[in-house]
Amino acid sequence: MSPRTAAQLDVLRTERKASIMDAALHLFAEEHYHNASIGAIAKRAGISKGLIYTYFDSKESLLVELMLNMFAELSAEFGIDENSVASRELILHWLTTSFEVVL
C-alpha cells in the first residue's frame, strides 16, 4: 500500500474530528456533559482515547467547538453575519432551536 497523500490525510483528519464531535454531541445529550467521559466519547467514535487529544485539548474545548459550530450553523440559517446585532426574540429562537437539535 502506498503512503497517503496530503489531501487524503486532510480528509481523514476531517472525518475523525467530525466523528469525535458527533459522538460527543450524542453523549452530552444522553448522559449530560459532566457525566460523559473522554473515554466514552472515544469508544463511541471508535478511536483511542489518546487520539481525541490530537484534535482537542480537553472535553471543555470539544464542547466549545461544538457550540461554536452550532452557532455558526444557526447564524447561517437565520442569515446573520458577524456584524449583525441579534434581537432578544432571535436569541430566544436560537436557544429553542439549539435545544431541539440536542434533545
Image (spheres, rainbow, N blue to C red):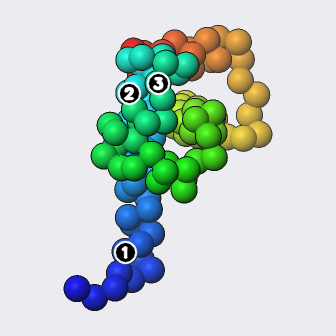
From mark 2 to mark 3, how far is it between C-alphas?
A: 10 Å
> Image check: 3 left or right of 33?
left
Dot in front, 3 or 1: 3
Identify residue for label 2. 26
Name the residue at the left extreme: 1
Indicate the amino acid at tag 1: Gln
Q: Looking at the image, which is closer to me, 21 or 102?
A: 21
Location of the C terminus by quadrant is top left
Give me the residue at 31% from left, 46% from top: 46
Q: Quadrant of residue 13?
A: bottom left
Q: Looking at the image, which is closer to me, 32 or 94?
A: 32
Question: Pointer 2 and pointer 3: residues touching (CB < 8 Å)?
Answer: no
Indicate the amino acid at tag 3: Ala
Up/down of 77 relative to 31, above or below: below
Identify residue for label 3. 36
Indicate the amino acid at tag 2: His
Up/down of 76 relative to 53, above or below: above
Query: In the image, which disc is placed on residue 8?
Result: 1
